[in-house]
Image (cartoon, rainbow, N blue to C red):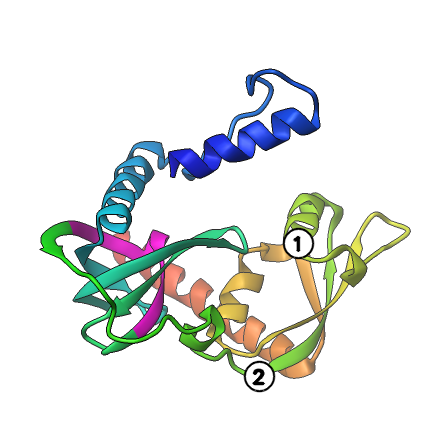
C-alpha cells in the first residue's frame, strides 16, 4: 500500500512543482474507523505481498455471514469503496469481496503459488445487478451536497427554488428503497408510481414498527 501511495504523491508533486507532499494527504480509512481500517489494510497487505491465504467472515448483501478461506489476488478501489479480488475455496471460483463487509480476517500461515485458474476480468466476478429502471427524483436544497456526491452532473437539473431534479437509472430492488429512504423527506419520487407506492409502504411499516416499540416501552 505504501509504495503506490508514495509514487502517486511523487507524481503529483512533480506535476505541481512541489518538492514535498505536505500539501496533500491521502487517507484510505473511513471517518471514525481509522484504527479498524488500518489493521485490516495491514493484514491485507501482508497477505497480498506474501501470497498467504486469508480466513474471513464475510457479510453478504442479504445480511448473511459465512466463514471461508480465500486466496487474495488484488486490492481494488472502485466507486468510493475498496474491494478484494480473490479466489474463494468455498465457491471454487473468483469473487469480489467488499472490504468493509469483511467482519473478521486472519492471515493464515499457508502460502500459495499459482492460482487454480487465470484471473478473470473483474466484471465476470461480480453478481449481475437487477434490471435498471428510469427514475425521476426531486431533491430539496438541504441535500444538495449528497446529490452532487452521488449523481453525475448531467443527471441533475437545478430548479428555480434551489431544488434538484434528477433523472437516473437504478436497480429496482430493496437496495433502492433503503437508499431513497436515507434522504428522509428531502426527496420526492416523481416517477415511477410503483416506486412511490413501495417507498410509502416501507415508510408506513417503519412508523408502525417504532409505534409498537414505543407502546411496549410505556
Q: Residue furthest left?
A: 109
- Mark 2 or mark 1, which is nearer the start of the sequence? 2
**For residue 216, which quarter of the picture?**
bottom left
State the SS at label 2: loop
Judging depth in this view, the residue of 193 and 124 nearest the camera is 124
Residue 31 makes an appearance in the image: no
Residue lying farthest right?
Answer: 160
- How busy is the neighbourhood of tag 2: few (under 14 within 10 Å), some, or many (20 plus)? few
- Which disc, if any, is residue 216? none
208 left or right, relative to 86: right
Q: Which residues are magenta?
A: 94-106
Q: Please state the total of marks drawn on the protein image.
A: 2
Q: Position of residue 174 (x, y in %)?
A: 47, 74
Query: Under tag 1, what secondary structure?
Result: helix
Camera-side mark, 1 or 2: 2
**Residue annotated with mark 1:** 186
Q: x and y percent of residue 105 in the render?
A: 19, 51
The residue pinned by badge 2 equals: 131
The residue at 56%/20% (across/down) is 21
Q: CA distance from mark 1 to mark 2?
A: 26 Å
Residue that appears at 29% across and 44% down: 45
What secondary structure characterizes most of the magenta part? Answer: strand
For image coordinates 65% across by 48% down, the residue present is: 149
Amino acid at each position: 500500500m505504501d509504495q503506490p501511495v508514495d509514487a502517486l504523491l511523487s507524481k503529483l508533486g512533480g506535476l505541481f512543482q512541489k518538492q514535498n507532499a505536505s500539501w496533500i494527504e491521502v487517507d484510505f480509512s473511513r471517518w471514525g474507523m481509522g484504527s479498524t481500517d488500518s489493521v485490516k489494510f495491514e493484514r491485507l497487505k501482508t497477505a497480498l505481498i506474501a501470497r498467504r491465504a486469508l480466513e474471513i467472515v464475510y457479510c453478504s448483501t442479504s445480511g448473511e455471514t459465512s466463514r471461508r478461506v480465500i486466496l487474495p489476488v488484488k486490492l481494488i478501489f472502485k466507486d468510493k469503496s475498496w474491494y478484494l479480488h480473490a479466489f474463494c475455496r468455498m465457491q471454487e471460483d473468483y469473487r469480489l469481496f467488499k472490504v468493509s463487509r469483511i467482519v473478521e480476517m486472519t492471515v493464515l500461515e499457508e502460502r500459495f503459488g499459482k492460482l487454480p485458474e487465470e484471473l478473470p476480468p473483474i466484471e465476470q466476478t461480480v453478481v449481475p445487478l437487477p434490471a435498471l429502471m428510469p427514475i425521476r427524483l426531486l431533491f430539496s436544497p438541504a441535500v444538495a451536497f449528497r446529490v452532487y456526491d452521488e449523481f453525475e452532473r448531467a443527471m441533475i437539473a437545478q430548479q428555480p427554488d434551489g431544488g434538484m431534479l434528477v433523472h437516473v437509472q437504478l436497480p429496482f430492488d430493496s437496495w433502492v428503497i433503503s437508499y431513497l429512504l436515507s434522504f428522509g423527506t428531502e426527496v420526492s419520487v416523481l416517477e415511477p408510481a410503483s416506486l412511490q407506492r413501495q417507498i410509502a409502504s416501507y415508510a408506513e411499516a417503519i412508523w408502525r414498527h417504532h409505534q409498537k416499540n414505543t407502546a411496549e416501552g410505556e
